[in-house]
């Protein structure tokens, strides 16, 4: 008898008592009291997710619920109340050897629910403990038949194999919607360090291969550019001017680049300067002959 049934029975009994004392109708009040006792003995309630397994004189009489249901006093009894919601059970396998003789510890989660209340309650002594034990033994079997690399790289396939094995073993138990997910895999520390070094070496190998490929590609582009500059000197000069501009565009420096035009212009300017110096010097007079008398 639960709280709701207790409240209903108490209310009916109080109504009978009130009728007896107020109306002095003791017979009617007694009837109400008897009804309250009968309701307390026969009326039951079950939640939306609960199913009550009822036995009549020791034999299965049916599944009652959800909501209100009645029992025959002294004849029918509630043997078990089964929860039909989806449940989860944690399963683990410690220090289990894989197919390649590696000791691992694995934690998994098993999801399941009761789909056949009669079978789960009347054919199994403890269906919750039994499904957990079956899941644990199945997990060990799957680990022993799988290599370490497959466990680490293909967990989905392992989940499917484990799920199929548990379903096959629990067939006919009244349990369904079985699903398994591997939560964690622990390996020995020494093996973990070795795998870390192996992965690091593989990454370094890939990095070096990528760097070598990039250097080959750059060298090939340099060779192609050299051929273009060899056939076209003007392109080489433009490239040189672009590099000089890129190197000094943020410094604000002035750069003088010698070219053939500036060289020729320098020669012309040098000739003009020499001519101007020659014209600016005074012409020297010839010395007078010896023995001559200067004129007054």
Image: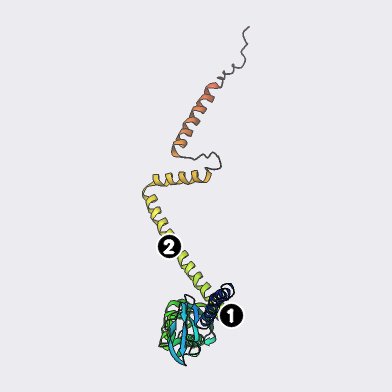
- Name the residue nearer the viewer: 130 or 241: 130
Identify the secondary structure beneath mark 1.
Answer: helix
Q: Residue furthest top?
A: 296
- Name the residue nearer the viewer: 141 or 24: 24
- Name the residue nearer the viewer: 200 or 254: 200
Please name the residue shown 36% across and 49% down the image. 231
Q: Position of residue 116 (x, y in %)?
A: 42, 84
- Name the residue nearer the viewer: 128 or 204: 128
Taking 238 as reference, is 177 above or below it? Answer: below
Q: Residue furthest left?
A: 231
Residue 117 visible from this viewpoint:
yes
Residue 107 visible from this viewpoint:
no
Please name the residue shown 43% across and 62% down the image. 216
Q: Position of residue 276 (x, y in %)?
A: 52, 24
The CA distance from mark 2 to mark 1 is: 41 Å
Within-10-Å neighbours for mark 1: few <14, some 14–19, many 20+: few
The C terminus - image quarter: top right
Taking 296 as reference, is 249 above or below it? Answer: below
Q: Position of residue 260 (x, y in %)?
A: 44, 39
* Residue assigned mark 1: 189
Q: Position of residue 113 (x, y in %)?
A: 45, 80
Q: Is residue 21 left or right of residue 136?
A: right
Q: Is residue 233 left or right of residue 8?
A: left
Please name the residue shown 46% across and 68% down the image. 209
Is tag 2's residue or tag 1's residue first in the polypeptide sequence? Answer: 1
Q: Which mark is residue 216?
A: 2
Identify the secondary structure beneath mark 2.
Answer: helix
Please name the residue shown 51% across and 82% down the image. 38
Within-10-Å neighbours for mark 2: few <14, some 14–19, many 20+: few
């Amino acid at each position: 008898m639960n709280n709701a049934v207790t409240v209903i029975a108490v209310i009916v009994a109080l109504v009978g008592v009130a009728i007896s004392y107020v109306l002095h109708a003791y017979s009617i009040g007694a009837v109400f009291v008897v009804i309250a006792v009968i309701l307390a003995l026969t009326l039951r309630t079950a939640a939306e997710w609960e199913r009550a397994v009822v036995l009549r004189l020791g034999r299965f009489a049916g599944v009652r619920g959800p909501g209100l249901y009645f029992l025959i006093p002294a004849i029918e009894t509630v043997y078990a109340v089964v929860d039909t919601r989806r449940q989860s059970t944690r399963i683990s396998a410690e220090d289990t050897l894989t197919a390649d003789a590696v000791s691992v510890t694995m934690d998994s989660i098993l999801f399941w629910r009761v789909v056949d209340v009669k079978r789960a309650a009347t054919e199994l002594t403890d269906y919750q403990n039994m499904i957990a034990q079956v899941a644990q033994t199945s997990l060990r079997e799957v680990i022993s038949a799988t290599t370490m690399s497959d466990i680490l790289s293909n967990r989905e396939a392992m989940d499917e194999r484990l799920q199929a094995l548990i379903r096959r073993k629990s067939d006919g138990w009244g349990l369904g919607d079985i699903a398994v997910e591997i939560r964690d895999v622990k390996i020995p520390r020494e093996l973990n360090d070795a795998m870390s070094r192996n992965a690091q070496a593989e990454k370094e190998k890939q990095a070096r291969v990528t760097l070598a490929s990039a250097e080959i590609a750059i060298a090939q582009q340099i060779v192609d550019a050299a051929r273009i500059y060899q056939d076209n000197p003007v392109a080489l000069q433009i490239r040189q001017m672009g590099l000089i501009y890129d190197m000094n565009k943020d410094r604000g420096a002035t750069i003088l680049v010698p070219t053939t035009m500036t060289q020729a212009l320098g020669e012309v300017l040098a000739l003009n300067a020499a001519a101007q110096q020659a014209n600016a010097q005074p012409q020297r007079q010839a010395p007078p002959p010896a023995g001559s008398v200067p004129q007054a």
